[in-house]
Amino acid sequence: MHCHRNPGAIVHFSGRRKERLDEIKRHTIQSNAKQYYTDAMLDDDGIMALFHGGVSEGSWTYQKYHSIEEATALAERFIGPVLAHSHTATAWQITARHTLDHEREKIVAAIQREFDLPWPDGESVGLAREATNAYLGTFTNA
């Protein structure tokens, strides 16, 4: 379902709870032999870097954390009224009704920025054209 073509559509989304970061900041956690969290990998905006792998090799993943209040505000700003929300110790879930329209040009600019973010080596994600075409194609492939 494409929400931009279906006003009134129900949108379900979820994310990681920012409150979980307080625990992570207090101490280093080794959740298993190959996964480590430390406060050195957490920035002021709540973006956490998580290393998967052994000491000499592995890979990084990144996750943005939001409080339920922040997530609700984002839903109300970009989707529409929140119908329900819930949370566990580590995650939140929101259901909202899509009632808001956004300028296509702003959406395209956001997609292009997201899919051309730089990698640490200076290269770019490089998928802006493909992502933009996929988004714009939803308007012609009804």
Image: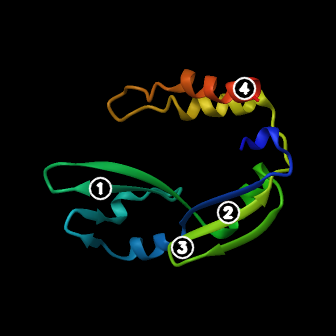
Residue at point 78%, 51% (across, down): 79
Q: Which residue is mark 3?
A: 19
Mark nearer the N terminus (4 vs 2): 2
Instruction: Read off the residue under disc 1.
Output: 51
Q: Amino acid at mark 4?
A: Asn
Q: Are marks 4 and 3 in contact (CB under 8 Å)?
A: no
Q: Position of residue 4 (x, y in %)?
A: 78, 39
The vertical placement of 142 against 27, above or below, is above
Identified at 47% across, 55% down, the residue is: 63
Measure the alpha-carbon separation of dots 3 and 1.
20 Å
Give the quadrant of residue 72: bottom right
Q: Nearer the viewer, mark 1 or mark 4?
A: 4
- Element type at mark 2: helix
Q: Amino acid at mark 3?
A: Glu
Q: Of the residues under marks 2 and 1, which one precedes in the sequence?
A: 1
CA distance separating discs 4 and 3: 41 Å
- Judge by depth and name the residue closer to the eye, 24 or 134: 134
Circles 2 and 1 in contact, beta carbons < 8 Å = no
Marks 1 and 4 sit apart, C-alpha to C-alpha, by: 40 Å
Point out residue 38 in the picture as x, y percentages from the top left corner: 32, 65
Location of mark 2 (residue): 70
C-alpha separation, residue under disc 3 versus residue under disc 2: 11 Å
The three-letter amino acid code for the residue at tag 1 is: Phe
Q: Earlier in the sequence, mark 1 or mark 4?
A: 1
Separation (CA) of disc 4 from disc 2: 34 Å
106 relative position to 44: left or right: right
